[in-house]
Amino acid sequence: MTSHKRKTGRRRAIAGALSALGITGAAVLTTSLLAPAGAATHGDSGTGAAPATARTAAAPAAWPRAKGTEPVPASIPVSGTYDGKLKRFHGTGELGSDGQDESQKPLFVLADGAVLKNVIIGTPAADGVHCLGSCTLQNVWWENVGEDAASFKGTSKSAVYAVYGGGARGASDKVFQFNGAGKLVVTKFQVADFGKLVRSCGNCKKQYPRTILVNDVDITAPGTSIVGVNANYGDTATLRNVRIHGDTKKKIKPCVRFTGNNTGKEPKEIGTGPDGTTCRYSAGDLSYD
């Protein structure tokens, strides 16, 4: 699918959407997520919390109940704000697949600056959500991820993709596929039974330096990795206040580094763990129960 391109209004649209959530874009993109690794973070009450090494990971919030069901036979285009009012949307017809076949169509296609909120994506989920530029996914839930939960495809380095709240489960591979340029911020999200939470595309024909920020999220095993990034293209992944559940042997890799390519070949894994450059976090940014 050809990416939509627009050079102005991205940050303004995202800032407006985040402001509606009671937070500012600047706070999300800088203050909380770019604090020194291992520094104290703030809870929902706004009071200082103990460092992650002294915390016990609390249980994730309960999933919402669907308020009705709507079959989706063709991708729904979204510009502006689309409020699903917690209705369950599921694919049918050509969107009636839960497989891992590449090039499936999504249930929702978001134009640059669009907001999708209060949506439950059921089964079949096809290829979830595509963002063609900056977008906000607020309180979006994937009951059983199809090919991917969401793919981010903007081509501007100033694009910002904000995932705020919601959750996903049953992802045999990736939850969020980051194919485009810019910055992806995942906040107050929960994921369970998954392969990778976020993967910077390792073999796309067009590659970019990508910035990934994961903050205040709940990760429930089984899972393979939280973030996968391409060190050779200048990707960075910052993890803060990540709560990991049911992984006593610590098999889930927080951050995996790859050598990406633009030839379509399988990228080579070159390392895991914090390195201060590509994978930016410390042990104090993670808690386990």
Image (cartoon, helix red, strand yellow):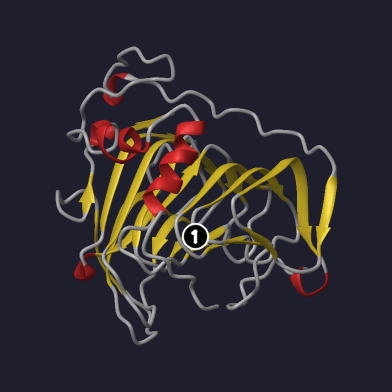
Q: Residue at x 77, y 57 (%)?
A: 90
User: Which residue does the image show at 58% across and 39% down from the upper left?
Assistant: 166
How far across and down, in percent of the image, does residue 1 sit?
A: 55, 78
Q: Which residue is mark 1?
A: 112
155 relative to 259 in the view: left or right: right
Depth order, front residue of 29/259: 29
- Residue under the image location 60 percent in, 66 percent down: 147
Q: From this viewpoint, is residue 226 visible?
A: no
Closer to the camera, 20 or 225? 20
Question: Label 1: few (<14), some or many (≥20) within 10 Å?
Answer: many
Q: Is residue 211 visible?
A: yes
Q: Identify residue type, mark 1.
A: Asp
Q: Is residue 213 above or below residue 51?
A: below
Pick whichever, 270 or 234, lies toward us: 234
Badge 1 marks a residue whose secondary structure is loop
Q: Position of residue 117 (x, y in %)?
A: 62, 43
Name the foreground residue: 135 vs 243. Answer: 135
Q: Relative to 105, is 72 on the left or the right?
A: right
- Residue 135 on image: x %, y %: 49, 53
Q: Image quadrant for the C terminus?
A: top left
